[in-house]
Each structure stands twice: as C-alpha cells, then as structure tokens.
Image (cartoon, grey):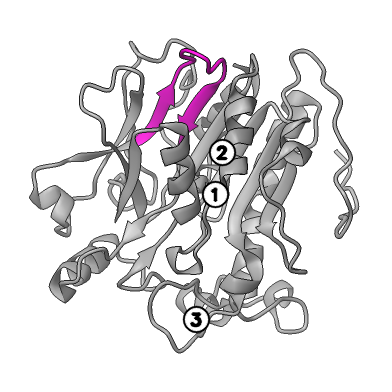
Amino acid sequence: MATLGRTYNQSHLPRKYERGKRRFSVYWTWSYPWESNADVTELDNRFSTMTEVRRVGWPTYETEDYSRRMFLQGIEGTLELFHLSLLNFQRVVGEVTGQPVAVYQRVDQAGQKLPIDQRILDDTDTMMIFGLDHIVTEQEAAPEEIAALKAFVAREGTCLLLAPHHDVGVSDDPNVRNMEYFHHGDPLVPRQQRFAKYVRSLMRGLGVPVENRWGLRPATLPGTTKTVPLAINGDLDKRGWLTNVKTFVFHMHLPHYAVTKEDAKDIHVLARQPIDLWKPHPFTEAGNREFNMFLWMPPSGDRAGDILLADSTIFTTLFGGDESLENFWKNLATK
C-alpha cells in the first residue's frame, strides 16, 4: 500500500457507516501541553524526555530520524513516540475494515480541547480510550461525556474499549515504592507514576467495577522479551475475541485490572498474564502469580454494546509485536 501524506490541524471528515466495516476511533486522554510542559526537575508523575529515552535506550534512537534536527527532544518527543507507535495498528485495522482509524487528543498540541461528544461518537463503532493522563493533570470526565458514552453503548453493534494505564507508587512507604521499581526494572519509570484519572471517572460513571492497579512485569521466555502465553478462559470468550491469540506484548509495567465488585457476573476476565517472579512485588508477596489483562462486559440491560478493558500498550509497537498480537487486532475489527 502506498504511503499517504500526513495531515494535521484540520477537522475530521465523518466516515460513512458500512455494514461489516467497523469505524475505529482512538482517544488519548492527556492534555498534551500540560504533560509536555511538566517540570523536568520533578522526579515523579511525568513522562520522560526524549533525551532521557535516548540515554536509557542507547543506541536505539541515535539516528538522524531522532536527532535534534528532526525530532523533539523534550517530553513532547516522547508523546510523539506514542503517536508513531500506533501507526501499525492503524494500518492493520484500516486494511481489515476499509475505514481509516481516527485519532483524537483531549487537549492537543495547539491547546484545542475536544471532550468526548457526538463529534467523535457519531461516526464511530469501536471507541478506544487510552488512559495515559497523569493523575496530577486533573483530567476528569464531565457528566455530559459520560452521558454521551452511555448513549453510544446503547447503540447496537458498538464497542467501548477502556485502557487505563498503570498506577505505580501509591504507597507512601519508600521501601514499597522501591520494591515496585526494582520489580518492573524500567529506569524511565519514576518511583511514583499514577495514570488515568480520566478513565477512572468514566468507569465510575458507566458502572464498570474495575480499577487499574500496580505496574507488573510479565513473565517472559528465558533469554527473551517474548511473554509466556496468556492464561485464557476460553469458556467465557463467547465472541471469540481471543481466537488464535496466545500472547499480547512485552511491557515492563502493566496494570492489573482489579474487579472491585464481589460476585461480578456481568464482567468476564478472559485473559490473565503470568508475572515475572524474579524480583518481589507487593502483589506477588500477597500470593498472586497472574494479573488480569483482558476483560469483557457483554451487552446487558439498556447497554447494547460491548465494553472491553485492555492496556493501551497492546495497540502500540513501541514494545514489539507479532502475529498473535495482530490476530487480536483483527478479531476486534471483525467480531
């Protein structure tokens, strides 16, 4: 497929509904200016600068493409890495559906705010909300946004994917924070990095009994960064979301999606990820050996659409990808 020119700073052109051709939209919950203007002398609750990424990842980014002549070197450069890493997902889903994947930001580079409303939802069948806003930036869903999403999932055939990212360093005890840090092993993640206040507020408003907790390192095959297979509950996967899927992607600090409601029959944990036990973590010290990775809330009551929970890193290629991951993307596009 020929490479197309990139566009920016224009209004989205609505996509026409075509039966069997799902229209995907991605919504980054961050305020791009607030995140990129964070004080880099602060240790916690901010993204790394691109300079820090280059130092830790050396020599991966020591190319002309990522030089100061061609690429942003501050926090904004790291945010652009997330955008670039979504391109493969957009390509695969676009090829399967015949529809372009629309990408939105809650507050973009030019400071233009776009709440979730009908401008986004009217031409969307699968809405993906990527919770990468730091809690300190105080992003929270307005009642009108929650109402708009309730109306969205009341439509037949819709799917809402919620993706709150990790919640590292909740404890005030520095020893616990250090244990978490050495467990995941990523020098770019500070001792405290709490994400997804916005998605949490959405989940409360929509009655989704889930919390994103911790930042857990998945178990991998010896000597590789390929994760060991997921523990899949095939009996509950009535829609086939995980057909021909064995693994997702390696990422050093993935959230555990804790179900907060006892006897929650309306939410199914379809996949759990075994945890790397090489370094201790409060979650494994409590006896846990897997964390909840992929959850599904089938249609129920007035809600005709599906609600899914899966981390945003499953849809980017910053941390790799393979045929199993693409199968998952294609399942989402066709189920």
Q: Position of residue 267 (x, y in %)?
A: 35, 23
Q: Residue at x 50, y 27 (%)?
A: 307
Q: Under tag 3, what secondary structure?
A: helix
Disc 3 + disc 2, Cβ < 8 Å: no
Badge 3 density bin: few <14, some 14–19, many ≥20, Cα 10 Å: some
Q: Mark 2 = which residue?
A: 146
Magenta-colored span: 293-310
Instruction: State the quadrant of the C terminus.
Output: top right
Q: Residue at x 49, y 42 (%)?
A: 202
From mark 2 to mark 1, how far is it between C-alphas?
Answer: 7 Å
Q: Position of residue 80 (x, y in %)?
A: 66, 65
Give me the disc on residue 55: 3
Disc 2 + disc 1, Cβ < 8 Å: yes
Task: Give the left or right position of residue 199, taking residue 28 as reference.
Answer: left
Q: Position of residue 181 (x, y in %)?
A: 26, 68
Can residue 61 be spotted in the picture? no
From mark 3 to mark 1, how far is it between C-alphas?
Answer: 36 Å
Give me the disc on residue 141: 1
Sooner in the amino-acid sequence: mark 3 or mark 2 = 3
Q: Residue at x 53, y 43 (%)?
A: 321
Q: Residue at x 17, y 75 (%)?
A: 174
Q: Mark 3 vs mark 1: give the one in front.
A: 1
Can residue 126 be spotted in the picture? yes
